[in-house]
Amino acid sequence: MVDDRDLQLLLLLEEDSRQAWRRIARLLGVSEATVYLRVRKLTEQGILEGYSIKVNPERLGLGACVYVIIKVRADKHKTVKEKLSRTKYIYEAYEISGSYHFLAKITAPTYQDAADIVDEIMAMDGVLEVLSFPVMRKVRASPGLIKDYIDWSNEGGRARAGGHRRA
């Protein structure tokens, strides 16, 4: 079960996972041992999966972002899924339901490079249709899942962690 203190701990880690546990303990008003035990519990429950960094793709020279939805023949679903998982510049890929079977996010140096990846996907055996959506500009980038979760919960949102109750 996740309680409000766990959410505050996750929020602090989401904001800066490199900060010292001593600082987190001080901010939460608990001991370092409590922070350690809660982090271990959240990890064992699969809620906390690891620590990461946030990288700006444009600063790395990856200025083109294109989303694609892909329709495939049923007998080639597994083959296409495996190829997508290994395709250069596909940053994220998901199986989806509905008329299309996959959603992929291409993050490439240029839009020409992204177009080449779209061509590569269209040439995959079993691909029936590809719709591409080049990103013109970012409208919203969440400060983090936990921040949004807390905000939504406080606004009467439906999302709730197991056992979490609004104060």
Image (cartoon, helix red, strand yellow):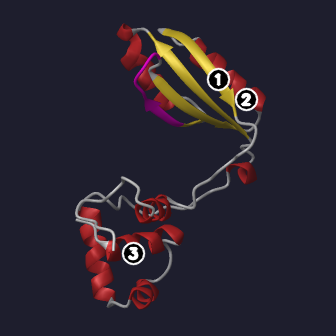
Which of pointers 2 and 1 indicates the residue nearer the eye?
A: 1
Q: Residue at x 73, y 29 (%)?
A: 113
Which sits earlier in the primary sequence, circle 3 or circle 1? 3
- Mark with earlier residue (2, 1): 2
For the residues labelled 3 and 1, the Cα–Cα distance comes to 39 Å
Q: Position of residue 148 (x, y in %)?
A: 49, 60
Question: Residue 124, labelled with which disc?
Answer: none
Classify residue 51 as left or right of residue 30.
right
Indicate the amino acid at tag 3: Leu
Observer-nearest of 142 and 73: 142
Range of the magenta residues?
A: 92-99
The x and y percentages for residue 132 are: 64, 23
Residue type at numbered disc 1: Ser
Q: Counting residues from the N terminus, which is met first, the one under dot 3 or under dot 2?
A: 3
Quadrant of residue 41 within the rendered picture: bottom left
Secondary structure at numbered mark 2: helix
Q: Nearer the viewer, residue 122 or 138?
A: 138
* 94 inside magenta stretch: yes
**Callout 3: few (<14), some (14-19), or many (20+) C-alpha neighbours within 10 Å?**
many
Which quadrant of the structure image shows residue 160? bottom left
120 and 17: which one is in front? 17
Distance from the alpha carbon under mark 2 to that under mark 1: 13 Å
Which residue is denoted by mark 2 in the rendering?
113
Q: Which residue is mark 3?
A: 9
SS at mark 3 in the image: helix
The C terminus appears in which quarter of the rendering?
bottom left
Q: Tell me the crowding category of disc 2: few under 14, some 14 to 19, or many 20 or more residues within 10 angstroms, Cα based.
A: some
Q: What residue is disc 1 on?
A: 132
